[in-house]
């Protein structure tokens, strides 16, 4: 029996949950247009462009979107671009000339896809911007993401909580510090990096203003804190440079704002390499935040090395992308829950935003294991199965 499209989405969600319970973050092929024999494919073909396979979060996103779409009866052309902008533009060009019926794109550089999006519009192909907003084009139809500014607020709150300046909810404790921190931002060509930074800096500002928080390097501008392509090695190098330039006289560093787990691991490597505080937070290692609940970082959190991460349930994001694609293919508009914030420079893109959670050592089980995102064995191993 062929499922109706609507039922298909529900089935997709259930299938997806089962798949990810079994192998969250497990390796995906870099390209896949296959469907099982007998599977319904008259729903059309959806092109899915993901930025890179070097981060397990994007592999999990690709897997989840693909299985959700396939369970809903679509063929999928899934491509990863190795964080190389020309490769991503070529992949999207090929999807358009290959005749896909809709595009789901997580851009490497949010400003580099204008001509691809013009071609998509000319061919009547709806474009769903996935997690990262595509900028400078009127031909972005819909945006599915998390509340990115709240991610930044949550990261800064975790840092303040880790230092003891606030409680877990962000209420000031009256502690006066001063605490020394350094700040990292993501890739400036990723629209999200600016939202994370804005949310974080607005949260930290009162504590910077009253002197309970100090940035000894004075690098408090996003352009100084940025990390091109979100590269772990780049963050490690900048942290090493900061330790040399600012902390070689024996100054203490108490915390680091990091917007992504890959950067956090680079920063932690630099801190441990320089003997800054100790091997764990308990031994005096600075408090380092994160994002994405990547398995290697979840293990570090369990081991008391990384302080926190922001959990973005990629299964839910994938479900929203599938729902949006289905709406377009049925000739309808997807339902937005945010229609004011995401101005891409040309228009405000209707968006569907999801909520996030902050993971600390004491709620790993509740947020990540009980939800089936990672198994306890994977966390203990620090590796996806
Ligand atoms: C951002 C995304 C983050 C993180 C980062 C690095 O766009 O929102 O969750 O994955 O890219 O990949």
Image: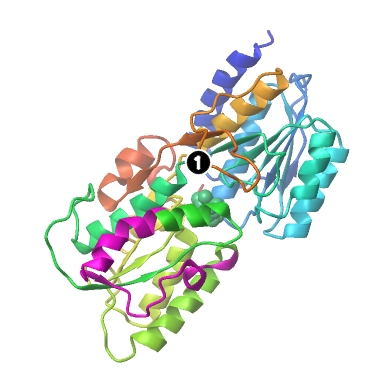
In this view, the residue farthest toward the left is 174
Q: Residue at x 37, y 76 (%)?
A: 271
Image location (x, y in percent) of residue 91: 79, 48
Q: Is residue 156 above or below residue 21?
A: below
At label 1, counting other C-alpha atoms closer than 10 Å, the crowd grade (few under 14, some 14-19, many 20 or more) is: few
Label 1 residue SS: loop
Q: Is residue 382 visible?
A: no
Image location (x, y in percent) of residue 345: 62, 48
Which residue is at the front of the view, 195 or 23? Answer: 195
Q: Is residue 38 above or below residue 257?
A: above
In this view, the residue farthest toward the right is 97
Which residue position is annotated with label 1?
Answer: 341
Q: Residue at x 65, y 11 (%)?
A: 4
Please tell me in which quadrant of the rendered image residue 158 appears: bottom left
In this view, the residue farthest toward the top is 1
Q: How is the image coloured?
A: rainbow
Image location (x, y in percent) of residue 305: 32, 64
Q: Is residue 116 above or below residue 339?
A: below
User: Does the magenta portion include 221?
Assistant: yes
Query: The N terminus lies in which quarter of the figure?
Result: top right
Q: Report the span colored magenta.
A: 199-228
Which residue is at the front of the view, 256 or 365? Answer: 256
Q: Residue at x 74, y 20 (%)?
A: 39
User: Does the magenta portion include 176?
Assistant: no
């Amino acid at each position: 029996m062929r499922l109706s499209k609507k039922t298909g989405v529900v089935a997709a969600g259930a299938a997806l949950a089962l798949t990810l319970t079994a192998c969250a973050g497990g390796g995906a092929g870099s390209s896949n247009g296959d469907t099982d024999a007998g599977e319904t494919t008259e729903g059309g073909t959806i092109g899915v462009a993901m930025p890179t396979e070097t981060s397990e979060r994007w592999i999990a996103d690709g897997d989840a979107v693909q299985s959700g779409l396939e369970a809903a009866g679509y063929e999928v052309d899934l491509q990863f671009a190795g964080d190389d902008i020309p490769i991503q533009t070529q992949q999207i060009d090929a999807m358009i000339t290959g005749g896909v019926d809709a595009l789901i794109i997580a851009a490497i550089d949010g400003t580099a896809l204008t001509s691809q999006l013009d071609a998509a519009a000319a061919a009547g192909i709806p474009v769903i911007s996935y997690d990262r907003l595509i900028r400078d084009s009127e031909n972005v139809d819909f945006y599915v993401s998390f509340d990115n500014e709240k991610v930044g607020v949550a990261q800064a709150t975790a840092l303040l909580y880790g230092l003891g300046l606030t409680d877990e909810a962000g209420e000031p404790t009256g502690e006066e510090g001063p605490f020394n921190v350094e700040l990292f931002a993501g890739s400036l060509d990723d629209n999200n990096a600016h939202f994370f930074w804005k949310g974080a800096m607005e949260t930290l500002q009162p504590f910077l203003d009253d002197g309970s928080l100090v940035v000894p390097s004075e690098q408090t501008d996003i352009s100084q804190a940025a990390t091109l392509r979100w590269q772990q090695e780049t963050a490690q190098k900048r942290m090493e440079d900061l330790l040399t330039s600012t902390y070689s006289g024996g100054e203490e560093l108490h915390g680091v704002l990091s917007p992504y787990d890959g950067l956090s691991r680079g920063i932690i490597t630099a801190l441990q390499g320089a003997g800054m505080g100790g091997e764990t937070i308990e031994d005096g290692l600075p408090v380092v935040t994160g994002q994405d609940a990547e398995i290697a970082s979840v293990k570090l959190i369990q081991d008391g090395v990384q302080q926190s991460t922001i959990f973005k349930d990629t299964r839910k994001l994938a479900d929203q992308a599938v729902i949006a694609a289905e709406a377009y293919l049925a000739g309808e508009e997807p339902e937005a829950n945010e229609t004011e914030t995401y101005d891409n420079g040309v228009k405000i893109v209707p968006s569907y935003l999801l909520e996030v959670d902050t993971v600390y050592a004491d709620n790993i089980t509740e947020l990540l294991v009980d939800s089936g995102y990672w198994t306890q064995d994977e966390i203990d191993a620090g590796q996806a199965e």
